[in-house]
Image: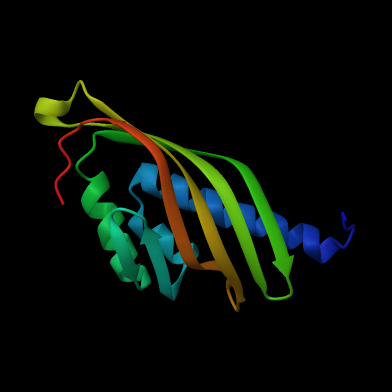
Amino acid sequence: MATTDAQNFADHLEIQQVINLYASALDKQQWDALEGVFTDDAVANFIGIGVFEGRQAIVELVASVLTQCSVTQHLLGNINIVVTGDTATATCYLSALHVGLGDYAAETLTVWGEYSDELVRTAVGWRIKHRTLTSQHASGDIGLNG
């Protein structure tokens, strides 16, 4: 059932902005911006890669991968959000394009997947407390290490 509650609309908008900030921060390599995405104690389960505990560990992982790319574009869609008081769940589709460097400058890696998030309302706004990335398809090789 749809709601017309103004707070619910505001929560949905802010959560969508947090989710979009993640993709934008990755593509611009603005690692400090991820402070506005994750709680300090966030956990990210990037299935097939590993589980990373704490915002700093998450930032270090994405930075170590994406600095091996000349450019990336993370496109998100089909964002679904359910807010229950001061907690929320969200899912969205991911299509990410990664372009290589050096010997791989003419190569691309494309990943399709889905993010599943658990969020909490904090004193500074909504933040992701737990994120799971399920990769549904990947193609290409840009020589990523680690």
Q: How many marks?
A: 0
User: In which quadrant of the rendered view does residue 69 lie?
Assistant: top left
Residue in the image at 43% along x and 53% along y: 133
Q: Where in the figure is residue 145, as x and y percent of width and height?
A: 14, 46
Residue in front for this viewpoint, 113 or 128: 113
Q: Quadrant of residue 42?
A: bottom left
Specify how the rendered protein is coloured: rainbow
* Residue 51 position (above or below residue 112): below
- Is residue 74 depicted above or below 88 in this figure? above
Q: Is residue 72 left or right of residue 114?
A: left
Q: Residue at x 58, y 73 (%)?
A: 124
Identify the residue at horizontal 20%, vertical 20% (top origin).
106
- Residue 84: percent from left, percent from top: 73, 71
Residue occupying the far left of the picture: 103
Quick one: 119 or 59, which is closer to the camera?
Answer: 119
Eyeballing the image, is 6 above or below 76? below
